[in-house]
């Protein structure tokens, strides 16, 4: 009979062994023991843990498939933002990149590490003292969702590292081709909808609220780098070896390339061989090897300068144009869409393809019944790129753009400077429905369950004529909609309720102001911090902002001048929709040890600003260096702003500063 101490020791030994065999099986693909022996180890551990339940820890291999479904994911702020990469589409663009950074590095010989660009979704894993404590999605790059329970189901991810390190690693979750086919087959046999491609399947799986469902999905992961860490490693090459040594699952095909020629060879080789891989790759990622140079090169607002993605040319397929329909967007743009003979392309079945606009149709001379070549590039919907005229039979017919809007019957117009035909009727139902869909979309207000079908019904039944109405729906009217059960109605209401808490930049994006997309919304939100302040802003004030040109500024001012806007905003306000941007979401709340520099005139005395920083454990310095965390900018700032942007120091205006130190 074991005593508790012996049991504890045995439990530790078992966990270590199980972790080890997991690694051999799932990462190295080379099991060292039989499945049966492995199961016996798990079983023994389970029995001991059942006897001594207080010895169960979160990182025990028995806890991979976690408990109860979650009601919602909580948010996780990324201390180091998860940015995206600049793309190079041609050899020239790649050469340009190399020359540009070589110049920035005083013409030193730059060496690289090149990796495959896995087409999945980015995640971050946080280890504290060697234990996996958090797993998160990229989200908007600054705030992601806590998907720890789902990521723990991926057997390749160690729950416990070989060393008690505190570090964040990042990687790509994906699904293999074979597993994807099988998953879809099983789903269609059960009468469920199938996924369009492996990436969607992976993304849908990591966002399951029930980890038991995620556990049944064949998710895999490749780690490709780090987030926040304090490892003393000075090159990416060494970092990859280090991560590999920690038994993290790395893609084996990375290579060290001493010069740009060998980088290009790598890209060329994998462009040809990519179909031999068991998973989707959409290009390569080229990373400067030396970390000292990463610091020198820094970041643009969107991406690091020390890396670039080389995108493989888009895949093409042939099909036939069965019909041409027109699509009405939320701004009234009427665009032709080709209805195709279904064809397989880059892992999914394509039935529709964009024809862009009337001029495109004419220029490419696309007729109904034509054989065409279609192309898909990344996320973008496929497009028709050319007609195979040799296959014409003479039975093809010309398509004529409608003179009236097919949704509202109003005559359409083509403004002289635009290639697009528009329905200028602001009350056009098709536009209104598109606005609802856009408002609810994932990257805007993220309202689950409000897709095209529901939006259309809400409009048709008079339940939501604008986005403001969404916040006044009730379960009685929802269940009157077709195919809306009580449960899905409740879920929709919950999701709408939850969206009230979204930060301002999401709301702004959702409003659908022309030229105000995700990025501009973020810029506006972090500058104005409150929707009412943005609404009151003058043209000049807007144009003074970086990245906001006259066209965008005019569109914003025009939007807030409309009477209809006021009506909608009042509905949102009354419903309690949040109009503020929480600065703490995008910036670290923890100011201890952070270094601040001030420039320009603040409305508060400098001494007061210094006191506020120091009270929180931060420091104030006179000039910018690599160690500066924040530059706070007042009126008439000096040249420090430029420098800060160049070396990637975060720039705050006074409002943001006030929020971050907690006085507004
Ligand atoms: S490095 C600052 N390496 O591509 C971003 N990314 O647009 C550094 N990806 O969001 C990313 N394979 O999800 C890196 N070997 C690889 C990658 C990779 C796929 C994804 C990643 C990122 C996106 C970049």
Image (tube, rainbow, N blue to C red):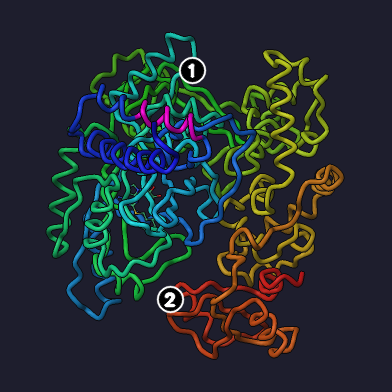
Tell which circle, 1 or 2, labels the residue nearer the N-terminal end.
1
Near mark 1 (Cα within 10 A), the count class, few <14, some 14-19 or many ≥20, is few
Disc 1: residue Cβ within 8 A of ligand 1's nearest atom: no
Residue 14 location, x and y as percent?
33, 37
- Decide: is 604 above or below 399: below
Residue located 31% across and 61% down the image? 307
Magenta part of the chain: 42-52
Q: Is residue 632 visible?
A: yes
> What percent of the width, then of the height, locates residue 658?
71, 73
Asked if the stretch drawn in magenta spans residue 655, the answer is no
- Based on the displayed image, in which of its 4 quarters is residue 440 positioned? top right
Write down the quadrant of residue 471 in the picture: top right
Q: Is residue 124 left or right of residue 587?
A: left
The C terminus - image quarter: bottom right
Q: Residue at x 24, y 31 (%)?
A: 278
Main secondary structure along the magenta-highlighted residues:
helix
Q: Quadrant of the N terminus?
A: top left
Q: Nearer the viewer, residue 642 or 595?
A: 595
Q: Which residue is mark 1?
A: 193
Depth order, front residue of 439/34 = 34
Question: CB at mark 2 closer than 8 A to ligand 1?
Answer: no
SS label for mark 2:
helix
Residue 647: image tag: 2
């Amino acid at each position: 009979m074991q005593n508790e101490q012996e049991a504890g020791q045995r439990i530790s030994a078992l966990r270590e062994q199980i972790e080890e065999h997991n690694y051999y099986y799932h990462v190295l693909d080379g099991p060292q023991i039989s499945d049966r022996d492995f199961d016996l180890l798990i079983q023994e551990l389970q029995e001991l843990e059942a006897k001594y339940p207080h010895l169960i820890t979160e990182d025990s291999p028995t806890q991979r498939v976690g408990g109860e479904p979650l009601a919602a994911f909580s948010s996780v702020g990324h201390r180091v933002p998860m940015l995206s990469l600049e793309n190079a589409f041609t050899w020239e663009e790649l050469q340009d990149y190399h020359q540009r950074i070589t110049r920035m590095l005083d013409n030193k010989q730059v060496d690289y590490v090149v990796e495959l660009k896995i087409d999945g979704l980015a995640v971050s894993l946080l280890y504290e003292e060697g234990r996996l404590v958090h797993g998160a999605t990229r989200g908007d790059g600054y705030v992601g969702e806590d998907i720890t329970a789902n990521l723990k189901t991926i057997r390749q991810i160690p729950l416990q590292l070989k060393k008690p390190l505190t570090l964040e690693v990042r990687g790509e979750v994906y699904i293999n081709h074979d597993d994807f086919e099988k998953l879809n087959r099983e789903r269609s046999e059960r009468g469920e909808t199938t996924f369009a491609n492996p990436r969607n399947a992976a993304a849908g799986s990591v966002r399951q609220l029930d980890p038991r469902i995620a556990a049944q999905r064949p998710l895999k992961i490749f780690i490709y780098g780090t987030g926040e860490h304090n490892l003393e490693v000075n090159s990416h090459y060494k970092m990859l070896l280090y991560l590999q040594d920690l038994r993290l699952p790395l893609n084996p095909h990375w290579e060290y390339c001493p010069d740009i020629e060998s980088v290009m060879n790598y890209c060329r080789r994998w462009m040809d061989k990519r179909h031999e891989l068991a998973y989707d790759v959409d290009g390569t990622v080229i990373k400067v090897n030396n970390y000292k140079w990463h610091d020198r090169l820094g970041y643009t607002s969107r991406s690091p300068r020390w890396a670039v993605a080389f995108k493989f040319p888009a895949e093409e397929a042939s099909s036939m144009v069965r019909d041409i329909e027109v699509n009405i967007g939320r701004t009234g743009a009427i665009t032709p869409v080709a209805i195709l003979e279904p064809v397989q392309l880059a892992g999914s079945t394509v039935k529709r393809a964009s024809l862009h606009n009337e001029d495109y149709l004419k220029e490419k001379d696309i007729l109904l019944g034509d054989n065409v070549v279609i192309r898909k590039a990344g996320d973008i919907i496929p497009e028709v790129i050319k007609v195979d005229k040799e296959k014409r039979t003479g039975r093809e017919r010309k398509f004529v753009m409608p003179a009236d809007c097919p949704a509202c019957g109003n005559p359409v117009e083509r403004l002289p400077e635009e290639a697009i035909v528009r329905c200028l009727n602001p009350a056009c139902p098709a536009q209104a429905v598109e606005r609802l869909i856009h408002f609810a979309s994932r990257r805007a207000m993220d309202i689950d369950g409000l897709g095209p079908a529901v939006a259309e019904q809400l409009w048709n039944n008079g339940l939501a004529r604008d986005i403001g109405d969404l916040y006044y729906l009730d379960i009685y009217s929802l269940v009157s909609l077709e195919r809306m059960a009580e449960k899905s109605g409740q879920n929709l209401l919950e999701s709408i309720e939850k969206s009230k808490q979204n930060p301002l930049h999401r709301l702004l994006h959702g409003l659908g102001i022309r030229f105000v997309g995700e990025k501009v919304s973020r810029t506006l939100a972090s500058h104005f911090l409150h929707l009412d302040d943005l609404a009151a802003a003058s043209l000049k004030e807007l144009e003074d902002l970086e990245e906001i040109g006259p066209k965008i500024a005019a569109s914003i001012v025009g939007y807030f001048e409309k009477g209809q806007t006021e009506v909608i905003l009042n509905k949102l306000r009354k419903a309690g929709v949040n109009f503020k941007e929480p600065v703490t979401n995008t910036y670290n709340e923890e100011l201890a040890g952070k270094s601040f520099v001030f420039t320009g005139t603040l409305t508060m005395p400098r001494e007061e600003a210094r006191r506020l920083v120091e009270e929180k454990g931060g420091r104030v310095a006179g000039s910018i260096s690599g160690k500066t965390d924040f530059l706070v900018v007042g009126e008439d700032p000096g040249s420090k702003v430029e420098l800060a942007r160049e070396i990637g120091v975060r720039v705050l205006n006074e409002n943001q500063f006030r929020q971050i130190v907690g006085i507004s």
